Amino acid sequence: MRASQRARGEDVALVDSLLSADERRRSSGVRFDELRAEQKQLGKLIPKATADEKAELLGRAEQLKADVKAADAERDAADAETQQLLLRLGNLVHPGVPVGGEEDFATLETHGTIRDFAAEGFEPRDHLELGQLLGAIDVERGAKVSGSRFYFLTGVGALLELALVNAAIAQATAAGFTPMLTPALVRPQSMAGTGFLGQAAQDVYHLDRDDLYLVGTSEVPLAAYHMDEIIDADRLPLRYAGFSPCFRREAGSHGKDTRGIFRVHQFDKVEMFSYVAPEDSQAEHQRLLEWEKQWLTSLELPFRVIDVATGDLGASAARKFDCEAWVPTQGKYRELTSTSDCTEFQSRRLSIRVREGKTVRPLATLNGTLCAVPRTIVAILENHQQADGSVRVPEVLRPYLGGREVLEPVAK
């Protein structure tokens, strides 16, 4: 755990504080049990004692009563401190993860061909200019109504979102996922249990009056769906595809990606979520990645797969793979999907277990983005644009757009 904390760039001393608190919890628990045992033994002796002995025993009983109360309080305090420190620890990092910060990832694969717009004879427009030409994106009125980083999808923009969501759900359903429409508001234990009230807390919206949180991903309600349950092993794997709105403060991204709809406060997303036996989690992680690659390939997007470095994992992930699509006007790859193996981290915090015969133990949870709508729209518009401002529709989406092959500008 110390090595994992060090690799994450997190506080290593936290591990020693935890061990110390846990030792106090154990020792105070032992002392409490010993005092309670003596108290019970004394209770049996008092009725049989002589008058002189009884006075002495009653005095001892009074002292024991105070000692038991103090030991109980000490045990509760040490237990509370242990639990609080446990919640601050990130998951154990998988040994194969590259060590370092955001830029220290390892590139695993590259797919598709990046278009040479210069060879095609025109300068590519960015997604916002294209969206305005198509009558698809309105950020000015989004800002007027709600503030910065909000937007309207209008006309073909709205239809394109619905097409993406339907196509993504169709792929997930065909792969055996159960489609889910999930709550956007969750209780604190759901948010904390999935690991989003630690380092990610600054990006979470909280409704003080109701003590509820707006989810940043349907991973949260999907993880908490089986909270406090024991699942029979023959039901695994359980796979869900959740569609939900997602809300993020983007508190640490002032001045980054302010143009258009790449980094916004509210967006819709289709998320894959799996419950598996712990020994199957790495294989399931590869399956989730394959489904993400299948999706991006069907959208005919050039992309690469990266193994995210330790300092950029997030608290709950032991390992994370991102698929980054090429964004022509930025001249670089940007994250479109992400899949994380959370091993037993979330299930322990949410008390989700698997029963195999007489054995009950924590299971593993994994998540994977299938379609984060705005960023996918960004990639589609920019990569499939044509010189006249129109945008070619990937074949997989055409059935969901009435057979439309091209999105045409509505204004010049």
Image (cartoon, grey):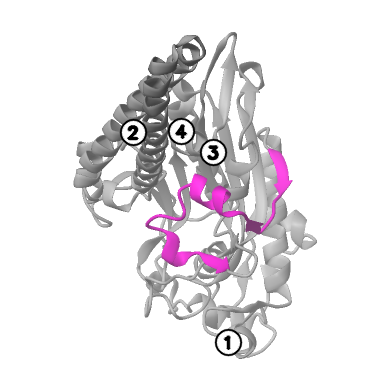
Q: Position of residue 47 (x, y in %)?
A: 52, 13
Classify the position of the N terminus by image quarter.
top left
Identity of the residue drawn at 43% across and 18% down: 54
**Residue beneath disc 2:** 25
Q: Nearer the viewer, mark 2 or mark 4?
A: 2
Q: CA distance from mark 3 to mark 1?
A: 38 Å
Instruction: Name the residue nearer the viewer: 8 or 331.
Output: 8
- Disc ID at residue 143: 1
Going by the numbered disc 2, the residue's amino acid type is Arg
Q: Are marks 1 and 2 in contact (CB under 8 Å)?
A: no
Helix, strand or loop at label 2? It is helix
- Disc ID at residue 286: 4
Q: Position of residue 396 (x, y in %)?
A: 67, 51
Helix, strand or loop at label 1? It is helix
How busy is the neighbourhood of tag 3: few (under 14 within 10 Å), some, or many (20 plus)?
A: many
Q: Are marks 3 and 1 in contact (CB under 8 Å)?
A: no
Answer whether residue 99 is visible to the viewer in this image: no
- Disc ID at residue 336: none
Q: Nearer the viewer, mark 4 or mark 1?
A: 1
Going by the numbered disc 1, the residue's amino acid type is Ala
Earlier residue among tags 3 and 1:
1
Q: CA distance from mark 2 to mark 4?
A: 40 Å
Left or right relative to 5: residue 252: right
Earlier residue among tags 4 and 1:
1
* The quadrant where residue 74 appears: top left
Q: CA distance from mark 1 to mark 2?
A: 52 Å
Instruction: Name the residue nearer the viewer: 32 or 279.
Output: 32
